[in-house]
Structure formats: C-alpha cells, structure tokens
Amino acid sequence: MHRNREVFLDNKHPWRVTQDALSALLPYMSKKTIKCSASDFIYLINNLNVTLNNLPSDDLRQKIANEGKGCFILECENDGPIKDKETLSCLSLPNSVSVMVSAELVESLKLRYMDTVSEQQKL
C-alpha cells in the first residue's frame, strides 16, 4: 500500500495499492477491480493519464464512473494479444484516470505488446 499525496482526492482515499502488491492482493480483492479489453489496457499503457472523455471505450468509461474516485485495479485476461492476466494499479480522479506504475513496468508492457501499441499509435 502507498499513501496518496494530500492533493489527491481531498484526502478521502488516502491509500492505494502499489503495483508490487497486486500479485499478492488480487486473489482476495472482490471490489475495486475492473475488467477491460486488451485494446483499452494497451491504450492506458500508452497514455498514462487520460481524461474520462478521451477513453476509447464507453464500457470502460462507465465502469470507472461506477467505481467512483479512488484506487482501482484494471485487469485484462486472455483477450487479443494478452494471453495471460495483466493488471495495472490506477487512480480515478474526478475527470481523469491515472496509471500508477513505475516507468520500468510501462516500458516492459510496451515491449511485450509492441505490435499492438504501434498499431494504435498509427490511428
């Protein structure tokens, strides 16, 4: 767990799950987990901070809006180029979503799904 900065969320959600803790905590989490498509997952890898209006999927936009503000886990499993389970720790702010992972992990994910990332950048 990591303490959010006081600036975020008026301190109503002071903690968030770190990416390193996801593998240990995910089997026990029943709330604050959002399943998404591979294209949405890869879009968020490319654009680490996205306004809700710019999300490509209405379905994902609705799921995030239903969760409300605070930390949530984005999960994609066995969809398109993602053949296993991938997760991201995210923070939902009033009008945007931020992916809260290290730069190293982002680069690793981009390398893993490089073909799909470059196809999305062409669009």
Image: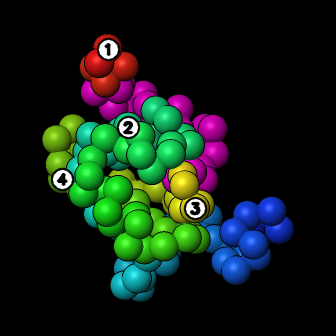
C-alpha distance separating marks 3 and 4: 30 Å
- Whether residue 21 is visible here, answered yes or no, is no
x, y percentage for residue 119?
Answer: 28, 20
Q: Amino acid at mark 1?
A: Lys
What main secondary structure does the magenta stretch of the protein show? helix
Q: Quadrant of residue 7?
A: bottom right
Q: Is disc 4 placed on a helix, strand or loop? A: strand
x, y percentage for residue 71?
Answer: 56, 69
Residue underneath mark 4 = 78
Q: Is disc 2 placed on a helix, strand or loop? A: helix
Residue underneath mark 2 = 43
Q: Earlier in the sequence, mark 2 or mark 3?
A: 2
Q: Is 62 drawn above or below residue 104 in the view shown?
A: below
Q: Nearer the viewer, residue 6 or 113?
A: 6
Q: Is disc 1 placed on a helix, strand or loop? A: helix
Find the magenta span and give its range.
97-117
Do tag 4 and tag 1 residues touch (Cβ < 8 Å)? no
Do tag 3 and tag 4 residues touch (Cβ < 8 Å)? no
Question: Seen from this angle, which residue lies furthest right?
Answer: 6
Q: How many marks?
A: 4
Q: Nearer the viewer, residue 17 or 93?
A: 93
Q: Is 87 drawn above or below residue 121 in the view shown?
A: below
x, y percentage for residue 3?
Answer: 76, 71
Residue 116 lies in the magenta stretch: yes
In the displayed structure image, the side of residue 117 where residue 51 appears, left or right: right
Residue underneath mark 3 = 94
Residue underneath mark 1 = 122
C-alpha distance separating marks 2 and 4: 16 Å
